[in-house]
Image (cartoon, helix red, strand yellow):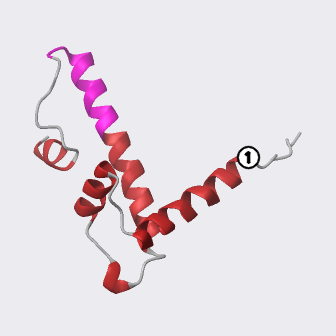
Amino acid sequence: FRWIKQNLNVPVLFGSTKNAVFNQLFAALMTYVVLRWLYDHSKSLIIACKSMPLIRFKELMQENQFQAEWLIAVTKILDKYVYFSRLDIPKVG
């Protein structure tokens, strides 16, 4: 629970019911997974001297203050997956 509160940026739980806590933690976990996936895939397109830790990536994403190299890498990754999601996949059967 401590890891969740620290790493998923959940300093305060807004609700006291079981459902409210579950929903808040689930939303934080989903956000973390998406950001981690985007970070890992974008990092492969960045040269070593321009790399940054995940926590800095999350901060810059939140502030919309990416360096040009990171902005280009994130855009390439997102464009690639948006393109694949729009392809018509023939149904089998």
Percent of width and height locating residue 13: 14, 27
In the image, taking residue 42 as reference, residue 12 lies left or right, namely left
In the image, taking residue 35 as reference, residue 45 lies left or right, namely right
Percent of width and height locating residue 16: 14, 16
Percent of width and height locating residue 86: 73, 46
Residue 78 lies in quadrant = bottom right
Residue 56 covered by magenta stretch? no
Q: Is residue 49 above or below residue 10?
A: below
Q: For mark 1, does the 10 Å Cα neighbourhood hold few (<14), some (14 to 19), or many (20 or more) residues? A: few
Q: Nearer the viewer, residue 68 or 62?
A: 68
Q: Which residues are magenta?
A: 16-28
Percent of width and height locating residue 10: 17, 38
Q: Is residue 64 above or below residue 29?
A: below
What amino acid is labelled 1 in the image? Arg
Local SS, label 1:
helix
Main secondary structure along the magenta-highlighted residues: helix
At x 21% / y 24%, what residue is drawn?
21
Residue 76 lies in quadrant = bottom right
Looking at this rendering, what residue extends furthest in the top direction?
Answer: 17
Q: Quadrant of the N terminus?
A: top left
Residue 27 covered by magenta stretch? yes
Residue tagged 1: 86
Q: Is residue 14 above or below residue 7?
A: above
Residue 18 lies in quadrant = top left
Q: Nearer the viewer, residue 57 or 2?
A: 57
Looking at this rendering, what residue extends furthest in the right direction?
Answer: 93
Q: Is residue 8 above or below residue 37?
A: above
